[in-house]
Structure formats: C-alpha cells, structure tokens
Amino acid sequence: MEVYLDNSATTRCSKRVQETVLRTMDSDYGNPSSLHKKGIQAEAYVKDAAFKIAKTLKAAEKEILFTSGGTESNNLALMGAALANRRTGRRLITTQTEHASVLNVMAFLEEAGFEVLYLPVDKDGIILLDALREAVNEETILVSVMHVNNEIGAVQPIEQAAAAVHEKNPKALFHTDAVQSYGKLQIRPKKMGIDLLSVSGHKIHGPKGVGFLYIKDGTKIRPLMLGGGQQAGMRSGTLNVPGIAGMGEAAAEAYEDFEAKISHLYSLKERLIHQVTKTEGITVNGKTGRDSAPHIVSLAVSGVRSEVLLHALEEHGIYVSAGSACSSNKHTVSHTLEAIHLEPALLDSAVRFSFCADTSLEDIDYAAGKLAEIVPVLRRYARR
C-alpha cells in the first residue's frame, strides 16, 4: 500500500492538468510572442490561465505575473519592491518563521543597506499584532508575512496585519507568501489589504517550475529579469506555456467544490490527530482546530529522530516530511520550531503530514496505525 502524505512538498498533477500540459507540448506548442497562428494559440493559453487565476482572487488579469514558482515570486516581490521604493525608506519587516526564500532575500537586502526587523511569533506560530504595529514607522516600505506556515500550518491574521501596517504607514507595501494557503483558503487580496502575493503551481496539483505573483495595480516594483520585454517588461523571457496553462487549470480546479474539499481536509486532520496522540510522547506542534491550515499536521515524536521515523514509515509505503522539503535534506534545526520555543529535546523529532483532497480516511487510518506500531520499537532502539 502506498500513502502519500507529503502534499505540502509537492502534489501529483491532476488528470485535467496533465491533459492541458500535453496539448501545449504536442499540438499547441507555439511561442506566445510569435505573430502567426501557432503563437496566437499559445498566447490564448496564457490569457486563459491569467483569467482563471484572477477569478479565484477576484483580481484583474493584468495583476497576475507568471514566474517560475514561489521562490522567484518571493524574490521579485521583496527585491523588486525594496529597490523601487528605497528613496522612500529602508525599513523592511518580516517574521522569524518565514520560508527560506523570504528570509534569505531579507538577509541579502540587509547586506545591501536595508534595515530588516524579524518579528517573533507566539507558541502557535502566530504573529503578535502589537509588535507589528510598533515596528512600522515612516521608514517602513515593505512588510512580508507568510499566510500559512509550511511546517506547522499556522494561519496568520493577514487581513488584520495588513490593516495594522497600512494604518501606521499607508505607503508601506504588504506582501504575503501564499504558497501553502492558495487553494486551501479563500483569498481576496484587495479586501485583505494585500499588495503582493506569491503562489506556486506544484502545491495545487499543477506542474513544477511555474508560479505567479499577484501585483496590485499601481504597486511600485522593479523587474529583476530584463530582456525581450515579455509580460509588460516585468519579467522578460519566453513564457512557459505548458506550465502556465497547467497552473491555470489547477487553480480553477482547486476552487471547484471548495467547501466540500476543505471540510474533507479538516476531517482528515482531526482523524489523524485523534489517533496518533493516543501514543505516549506524540504531540502536535501548533494549533489543531479549524483556525489552523486544513492540510498540515506537525508532530513531535519524543525519543525518535525525525529522519529515522521518516524512513521507517517509508518502508511501509508512507511518505511524510521532516519539516520543510526545501530544508529537510540539510540536517538543520527548524527555525520555525525554534521560534515557537519547542522543547530543545523535540527539535529533531518533528515530522510533517500533509494531505490533499484525494487523501482518504483509510489512508489516515493506515498511517496512524503504522505510526503507533513503529514509534515504540524505534524508541527501544534509541535507548540502547
């Protein structure tokens, strides 16, 4: 039996996405910048994807910029906004629990002369709004707060955070990394006060190597990719039509029967937590209720190293992650778990289970059952 519970790392492309990608690679393979029929066909796929994505956000199609994924979207949002607005101020604000593609960009900008404040979070990974208000001043040009944490599933109060920022400094831009929330939460950038929003295609059953950045109309931002002037000069380079078309299909599909899908995900989450916490020494990192992300459960398994448990589960066909897929192969302590002040003895004992709409209750029961069998055995070996 194979049970894939690492959907926050990547998802399987849906059948609709696969069919769309194949068409754009086989019959409709033109360059969207070409003026002949093949180019016009390819351009139609790009426009259709922008329309579908914009519809999910209640945004304008011109506000959707295609990128190579969440990392590039975050880089463009942060560096592009910082460079474009540096004459206004040099203060940047983020949190201690952001993805590496935000934290490393902030470190780069710090070296370039910007001031960066890294705000703490509470024990559940939630930003402290009072600390955010206090941090914003007239020098603040950009604030970046991840919508859903990729390791523990903490859902940030984005609308309240953006309002707090804009109340203190209306000129400051508000960015959110929505890679783990898009397709799992309803997102309305204009209503929520979001100026810049990053998304990756392969987290929503779309292809890898493609994403988008929502840029609110009128937002001052500089391009990082220069060349032939594609996408109104904001990101030059031949467009990845198969990836873009596939992501557009995935975006539309993600929000079909949305409430039923999310209810199913929460049922999976509740079932897993109920079953695994019966085993002594297994606790949940972060919130467990419907005020947390529906698709992520982070467990601390005392007495067992996460890497050992990951491979033990893999032997039974169960695939999970030791935290973020972008850093789990580097054997580093999770900065998110440190930020929520997890007990030092548990920092190397966290595993992440993440679901999708295709995950079944039977999958959860199988994984929970194997976990209950494996953990006591691994603990006995660890004590030797």
Image (spheres, helix red, strand yellow):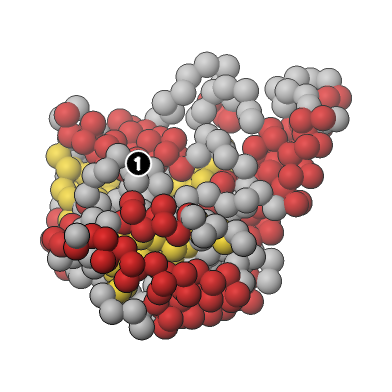
Q: Is residue 173 visible?
A: no
Residue 144 higher or lower than 284, as above or below: above
Can you tell which quarter of the image residue 164 is in?
bottom left
Q: Is residue 115 left or right of residue 257?
A: left
The spot of residue 228 in percent (x, y) is 57, 17
Residue 68 on image: x %, y %:
52, 34
Find disc 1 in the rendering and name its residue. Answer: 329
Q: Residue at x 83, y 20 (%)?
A: 36
Q: Which of the two residues, 3 or 194, is positioned nearer the viewer here?
A: 3
User: Which residue extends farthest top?
Assistant: 227
Locate residue 22 relative to residue 337 in the image: left or right.
right
- Label 1 neighbour load within 10 Å: few <14, some 14-19, many 20+: few
- The answer to whether any part of residue 96 appears in the image is yes
**Residue at left 73%, top 23%?**
31
- SS state under label 1: loop
| Callout count | 1
Q: Position of residue 128 (x, y in %)?
A: 20, 67
Along the line of sight, the residue nearer the viewer: 183 or 87: 183
Q: Is 152 left, or right, of 5 in this rendering?
A: left
Is residue 321 shown above or below 244?
A: below
